[in-house]
C-alpha cells in the first residue's frame, strides 16, 4: 500500500478550512471586539509566551471579518414565522397572535416586522434547524401555517 501524498493545494485547502473554523468560533463566542492575535501575543507572567508569525493579510482579513460580523448584530440561525398577513386589520390580527403566543410561551422571544404590505411575527432564536423543528412541532397545533425561516438571530446568552 502506497502512503498518501499531501499536495500543496491540499495543505492550503486544509489550512483555509481550519482558519474559517477559527473565525466562526470567534464570532459565535460573541467576542467580536477582541483580536485573537493580540490576545495570544500578550505576555502573561508565569504562563508562557506565544509567538505568532504570519502574513499581515491574515490579520487584516481577521479585522475585516470582525468589523462586518459586529454590524450583523447576531449570528445566522433560524426563527419560526407564526403570522404573516396584509390588509386593513392585519396589525390587529398580528397583535392578537402575539398576545396569544406570549401568554402560552412567555420565555420565548418574538419579533414583529412590517415589510409593506405584510405584518409578520417571528418567534425564537434557534441556532440549528433541528432546534427550530422541535419547537415548531410543539406550537403547530396552536399556530397553523407556522414555518421555519433562516434569519440573523440574537447572540445566545453565555452561561
Image: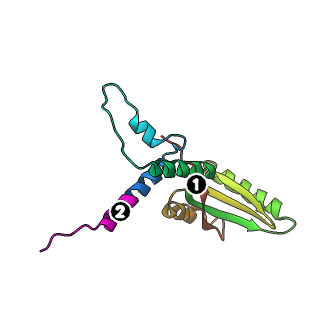
**Left or right of 5, for residue 99:** right
The answer to which of 65 and 145 lies nearer the viewer is 65
Q: Determine the residue located farthest toward the right in the rendered image.
A: 88
**Left or right of 97, for residue 71:** left
Q: Residue at x 61, y 48 (%)?
A: 107
The numbered mark at residue 12 is: 2
Q: Residues within 10 Å of mark 1 (few under 14, many from 20)?
A: many
Q: Determine the residue located farthest toward the top in the rendered image.
A: 45
- Distance from disc 2 to disc 1, alpha carbons, whole Å, reads 35 Å
Residue 51: x and y in percent read: 34, 39
The numbered mark at residue 101 is: none
Counting the numbered discs, the total is 2
The numbered mark at residue 125 is: 1
Residue 43: x and y in percent read: 37, 30
The answer to which of 93 and 63 lies nearer the viewer is 63
Question: Residue 118 in magenta?
Answer: no
Question: Residue 7 in magenta?
Answer: yes
**Is the Cβ of the residue at disc 2 closer than 8 Å to that at disc 1?**
no
Above or below, 1 relative to 42? below
Q: Quadrant of residue 152?
A: bottom right
**Disc with the residue nearer the chain's start (2 vs 1):** 2
Q: Quadrant of the N terminus?
A: bottom left
Above or below, 90 relative to 101? below
Q: Determine the residue located farthest toward the left in the rendered image.
A: 1
The answer to which of 60 and 24 lies nearer the viewer is 60
Q: Residues within 10 Å of mark 2 (few under 14, many from 20)?
A: few
Q: Secondary structure at mark 1?
A: strand
- The segment highlighted magenta reads 1-17
Residue 52: x and y in percent read: 36, 42
Residue 32: x and y in percent read: 54, 44
Q: Residue at x 57, y 51 (%)?
A: 69
Q: Secondary structure at mark 2?
A: helix
Amino acid at each position: 500500500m502506497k502512503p498518501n501524498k499531501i499536495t500543496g493545494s491540499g495543505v492550503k485547502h486544509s489550512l483555509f478550512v481550519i482558519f474559517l473554523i477559527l473565525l466562526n468560533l470567534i464570532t459565535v463566542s460573541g467576542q467580536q471586539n477582541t483580536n485573537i492575535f493580540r490576545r495570544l501575543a500578550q505576555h502573561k507572567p508565569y504562563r508562557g509566551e506565544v509567538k505568532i508569525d504570519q502574513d499581515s493579510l491574515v490579520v487584516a482579513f481577521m479585522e475585516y471579518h470582525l468589523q462586518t460580523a459586529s454590524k450583523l448584530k447576531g449570528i445566522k440561525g433560524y426563527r419560526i414565522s407564526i403570522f404573516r398577513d396584509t390588509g386593513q386589520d392585519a396589525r390587529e390580527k398580528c397583535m392578537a397572535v402575539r398576545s396569544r403566543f406570549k401568554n402560552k410561551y412567555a420565555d420565548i422571544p418574538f419579533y414583529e416586522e412590517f415589510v409593506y404590505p405584510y405584518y409578520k411575527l417571528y418567534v425564537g432564536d434557534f441556532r440549528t434547524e433541528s432546534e427550530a423543528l422541535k419547537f415548531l412541532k410543539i406550537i403547530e397545533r396552536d399556530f397553523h401555517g407556522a414555518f421555519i425561516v433562516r434569519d440573523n438571530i440574537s447572540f445566545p446568552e453565555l452561561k
